[in-house]
Amino acid sequence: MHLSEEKSRKLLNYATVISSIIMIILVIYWYRLGIFTDQAKMRAYLANKQIVGPLIFVLIQIVQVVIPIIPGGVSLLGGVVFFGPVAGFIYNYVGICIGSLINFFLARHYGKTFIYHIISEETFEKYVDWTKNQKRFNWLFALCILAPAAPDDVLCLLAGLTEMKFWTYFWIIILCKPWTIAAYSLGLVYGSKWILGFFQK
């Protein structure tokens, strides 16, 4: 089943608008609580939201993977800052993996019409040749999911158009994603600390 271009556009527009509204409301709410400027308030807030807080964050991560309305690096850093390196990594990992699995199903069921609303046709054409040999694509896909700075979001969508088995995709995501998430998280945390330290000198 393939959505028409008009229906696909409407679906994504609605999802983007709803996600954006939810995130804006959350950011305003958190800002008014002072958790962005006061670490004590942030810890107190998270201590009272041991279940709801992580669930909200995981939901945000899922949304930003499926509909990239915010840079992935921002949400990765947010997970580590809000919840600490271990819990933040886990929540980042869970949200990104679920979002990646959703992308696979959406691409498989709704085809290129859906993908063209997430990435440009130019980007699609740039990488679609990778899928001509399924066995080779499986290996390339695994290596790109494992490697930082690879176009993994694009390839997750493309994988849904190929004959890749779901369980092959599933295990590649589950086993390879944690390494890139850890690398990004550590890089962002220590990089931001270095920048702050540099300007505070």
Image: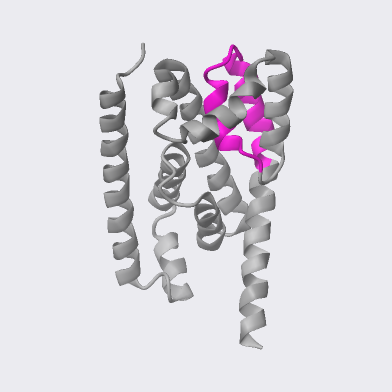
Q: Is residue 94 visible?
A: yes
Q: Is residue 154 magenta?
A: yes
164 horizontally vs 108: left or right: right
For residue 187, above or below residue 126: below
Quadrant position of the C terminus in the picture:
bottom right
Q: Quadrant of residue 147?
A: top right
Quadrant position of the N terminus in the picture:
top left
Residue nearest the viewer, comparing 6 with 142: 6
Measured from the top left, where is residue 87 in percent x and y? 57, 52
For residue 104, above or below residue 31: above
Q: Quadrant of residue 146?
A: top right
Measured from the top left, where is residue 186 in percent x and y? 67, 58
Q: How is the image coloured?
A: one colour
Is most of the magenta stretch helix, strand or loop? helix
Q: Residue at x 62, y 57 (%)?
A: 85
Measured from the top left, where is residue 184 in percent x and y? 65, 52
For residue 122, above or below residue 105: below
In this rendering, the count of numbered labels is: 0
Which residue appears farthest toward the bottom when viewing the image? 201
* Boundaries of the magenta span: 150-178
Measured from the top left, where is residue 154 in percent x and y? 55, 33
Residue nearest the viewer, comparing 41 with 28: 28
Q: Quadrant of residue 171?
A: top right
Q: Residue at x 44, y 76 (%)?
A: 38
Q: Is residue 98 visible?
A: no
Residue nearest the viewer, comparing 82 with 136: 136
Q: Residue at x 67, y 81 (%)?
A: 198
Q: Is residue 198 magenta?
A: no
150 horizontally vs 59: left or right: right
